[in-house]
Image (tube, helix red, strand yellow):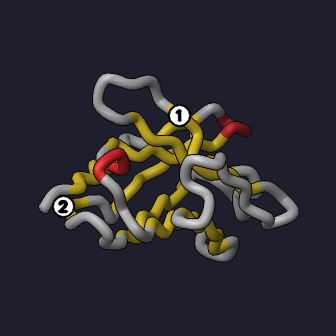
């Protein structure tokens, strides 16, 4: 069974940066289709980044230019680099593997001065 574990969240000042990691286990080879979501307080979970077999990440306009998704296929790890954090970046960030319908437990990012 596939399991996903996120890490890298924490407290950061406005304008700061974080790099989140999602490590997959229970797979025999690299995972090719992965997504990052976030859930802000009082809002529904939303997609913020995704990557597929073409290794070209795509982003919604709300985060484009500040979020960067990448993948380490050898270690089955995906990353989310977040730059220029704003207050609305405060959220629980989740990785998701569509192929197995598996969610990670989430990692909290808090943007505060």
Earlier along the polypeptide chain: callout 1 or callout 2? 2
Q: Residue furthest right?
A: 54
Q: Dividing the picture into quarters, in which one does residue 30 lie?
A: bottom right
Q: In which quarter of the image is the C terminus?
A: bottom left
Q: How crowded is mark 1: few (under 14 residues within 10 Å), some or many (20 or more)?
A: some
- On screen, residue 57 versus residue 25, left or right, reads right
Q: Is mark 2 on a helix, strand or loop?
A: strand
Foreground: 59 or 62?
62
Q: What element carries label 1?
A: strand
Foreground: 95 or 62?
62
Residue drawn at (64%, 69%), measured in percent from left and top? 71
- On screen, residue 106 versus residue 74, left or right, reads left
**Residue 25 seen in render:** yes
Distance from label 1 to label 2 (Cα)? 21 Å
Query: Can you give x and y, in whole percent of width and height, for residue 67 in the image?
Result: 54, 63
Foreground: 73 or 8?
8
Q: Dividing the picture into quarters, in which one does residue 1 lie?
A: top right
- Residue pointed to by mark 1: 46
- Residue pointed to by mark 2: 11
**Residue 77 seen in render:** no
Q: Is residue 81 above or below residue 11?
A: below
Instruction: Look at the numbered discs 1 and 2 and tell me whether their residues touch, using CB distance below 8 Å.
Output: no
Q: Residues within 10 Å of mark 2 (few under 14, many from 20)?
A: some
Query: Can you give x and y, in whole percent of width and height, for residue 43 in the image?
Result: 39, 25
Query: Can you give x and y, in whole percent of width and height, for residue 91 in the image?
Result: 33, 43
- Image disc number at residue 1: none
- On screen, residue 78 versus residue 9, left or right, reads right
Residue drawn at (43%, 70%), measured in percent from left and top? 83
Residue drawn at (67%, 76%), measured in percent from left and top? 74
Residue drawn at (27%, 49%), measured in percent from left and top? 108
């Amino acid at each position: 069974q596939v399991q996903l574990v996120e890490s890298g969240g924490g407290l950061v000042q406005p304008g700061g940066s974080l790099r989140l990691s999602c490590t997959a286990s229970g797979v025999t080879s690299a995972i090719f289709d992965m997504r990052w979501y976030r859930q802000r307080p009082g809002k529904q979970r939303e997609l913020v980044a995704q990557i597929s077999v073409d290794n070209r990440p795509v982003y919604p306009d709300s985060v484009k230019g500040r979020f960067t998704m990448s993948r380490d296929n050898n270690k089955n790890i995906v990353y989310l680099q977040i730059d220029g954090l704003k207050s609305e970046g405060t959220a629980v960030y989740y990785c998701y593997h569509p192929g197995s319908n598996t969610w990670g437990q989430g990692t909290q990012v808090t943007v505060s001065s």
